[in-house]
């Protein structure tokens, strides 16, 4: 029964299937009120269509209030759960839109309030706050392959290698490097640029192989 | 974190048929019926106050009783209306005219009694019996309200609990006035206003948590909820 109720092309039968099963609004969208009424009666297909229809709508509302995509998704899920829990409180004779909007606004406001309270007394930890007794554990570059970079630098042409060593490894300014190497600033810039490009390519090749 | 499509799958799996809530007016009427039953039981058990015939001839007393009763009825209707998400917040104002009349009659009789009797007319034993009536009226009505409005925990808990508290307080004050002859000076203020304020205040403070607690106890969340009401 349930399967035939939802198929777009109803099978031939002597019993007329009610035409209102796939009711659509004037704008072509599905009638949420009708879907909810059927969901209240236990029609899971209608309920799934309703929740899937509602999700982007709720996401657009939540997107106006939260910046982080994960916060938006949390709010969407909160609203969906609330709709599920209070679905028996919906009266099919009343429009569904205001009912949903009121729930969404209420849940989003509650989340915003909770967020503000948390922000007032809690501080998010960043990587710098994390400390362990083992010294290397506190380094951000834990996975950084230093040896591979050193090897790649050694394989650079001499001018590029010199520019990288002076400007990046020894952190000299362009002026100091120009004075030390006797080359022009422009030449050093070009050499650094080319060196970085070659290094990137070499390291990518390496990681591609491994 | 659960992905939204997974959540939808879980919710659809738990989508058992639910019984729709009856219209808010019908539900308010059911609660008022329970309130009437409690009142009848209390009057039967305790008996009416000895001076009821005399008091009923006093317009201020009658007005005060009627105003308390109407405040209770209107606040009950408002709390069932406001518990639904798509109803207007203006419902909160529904009991305010009756509430204003009730409060002003309390103030008036308090002032006139104060002048005629004086402020030292406190009767301790009657006060203790009053307290029993107060508990007998307000506890069953509060429990009924909590159970009937548990779904509002996620929607408008504060507004609903304020209105429920007012309805319960007004009904309790009505039953107190009907049963106990405790109308003199300070006690009026202490009992009527104090009890009303106490119940409404407690409802405001703890209503939110109580609704959430009741909702959790009576409904398995989220798979299957709200199908008993």
Image: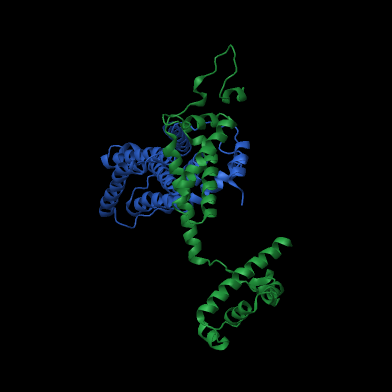
Chain colours: A green, B blue
Q: Residue at x 29, y 40 (%)?
A: B63
Residue B34: percent from the left, percent from the top? 47, 35
Q: Outermost residue toward the top?
A: A14
On screen, residue B177 above or below A42: below
Regarding residue B156, the answer to whether it shows in the image is: no
Q: Residue at x 61, y 25 (%)?
A: A2
Q: Nearer the viewer, residue A50 or A98?
A: A50
Residue B38: percent from the left, percent from the top? 47, 37
Q: Nearer the viewer, residue A77 or A194?
A: A194
Residue B144: percent from the left, percent from the top? 50, 40
Residue A54: percent from the left, percent from the top? 50, 40
Q: Nearer the viewer, residue B196 or A162?
A: A162
Q: Nearer the viewer, residue B207 or A199?
A: A199
On screen, residue B136 above or below A29: below
On screen, residue A78 above or below B35: below
On screen, residue B172 versus residue B224, left or right, reads left
Regarding residue B35, the answer to whether it shows in the image is: yes
Q: Quadrant of residue A195?
A: bottom right
Q: How many marks?
A: 0
């Amino acid at each position: 029964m349930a399967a035939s109720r939802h198929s777009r092309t109803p099978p031939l039968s002597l019993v007329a299937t009610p035409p209102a099963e796939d009711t659509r609004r004037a704008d072509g969208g599905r009638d949420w009120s009708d879907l909810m009424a059927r969901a209240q009666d236990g029609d899971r297909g209608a309920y799934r269509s309703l929740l899937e229809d509602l999700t982007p709508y709720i996401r657009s509302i939540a997107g106006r209030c939260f910046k982080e995509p994960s916060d938006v998704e949390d709010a969407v899920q909160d609203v969906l759960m609330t709709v599920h829990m209070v679905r028996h409180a919906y009266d099919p004779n009343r429009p569904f839109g205001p009912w949903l909007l009121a729930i969404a606004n209420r849940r989003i406001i509650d989340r915003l309030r909770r967020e503000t309270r948390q922000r007032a007394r809690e501080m998010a930890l960043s990587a710098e706050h994390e400390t362990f007794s083992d010294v290397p554990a506190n380094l951000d570059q834990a996975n950084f392959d230093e040896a591979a970079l050193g090897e790649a630098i050694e394989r650079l042409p001499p001018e590029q290698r010199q520019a990288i060593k002076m400007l990046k490894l020894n952190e000299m300014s362009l002026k100091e490097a120009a004075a030390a190497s006797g080359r022009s600033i422009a030449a050093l810039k070009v050499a650094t640029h080319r060196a970085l490009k070659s290094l990137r390519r070499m390291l990518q090749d390496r990681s591609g192989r491994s | 974190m659960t992905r939204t499509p997974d959540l939808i799958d879980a919710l659809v799996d738990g989508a058992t048929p639910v019984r729709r809530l009856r219209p808010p007016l019908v539900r308010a009427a059911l609660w008022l019926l329970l309130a009437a039953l409690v009142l009848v039981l209390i009057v039967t058990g305790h008996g009416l106050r000895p001076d009821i015939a005399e008091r009923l001839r006093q317009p201020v007393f009658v007005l005060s009783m009627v105003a308390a009763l109407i405040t209770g009825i209107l606040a009950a209707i408002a709390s069932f209306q406001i518990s639904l998400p798509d109803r207007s917040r203006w419902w909160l104002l529904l009991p305010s005219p009756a509430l204003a009349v009730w409060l002003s009659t309390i103030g008036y009789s308090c002032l006139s009694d104060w002048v005629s009797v004086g402020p030292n007319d406190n009767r301790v034993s009657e006060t203790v019996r009053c307290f029993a009536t107060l508990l007998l009226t307000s506890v069953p009505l509060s429990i009924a309200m909590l159970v009937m409005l548990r779904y509002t925990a996620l929607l408008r808990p504060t507004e609903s609990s304020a209105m429920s508290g007012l309805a319960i307080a007004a009904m309790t004050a009505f039953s107190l006035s009907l049963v106990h002859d405790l109308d003199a000076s300070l006690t009026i203020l202490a009992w009527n206003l104090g009890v009303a304020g106490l119940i409404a205040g407690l409802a405001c403070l703890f209503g939110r948590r109580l609704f959430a607690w009741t909702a959790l106890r009576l409904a398995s969340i989220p798979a299957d909820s709200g199908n008993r009401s």
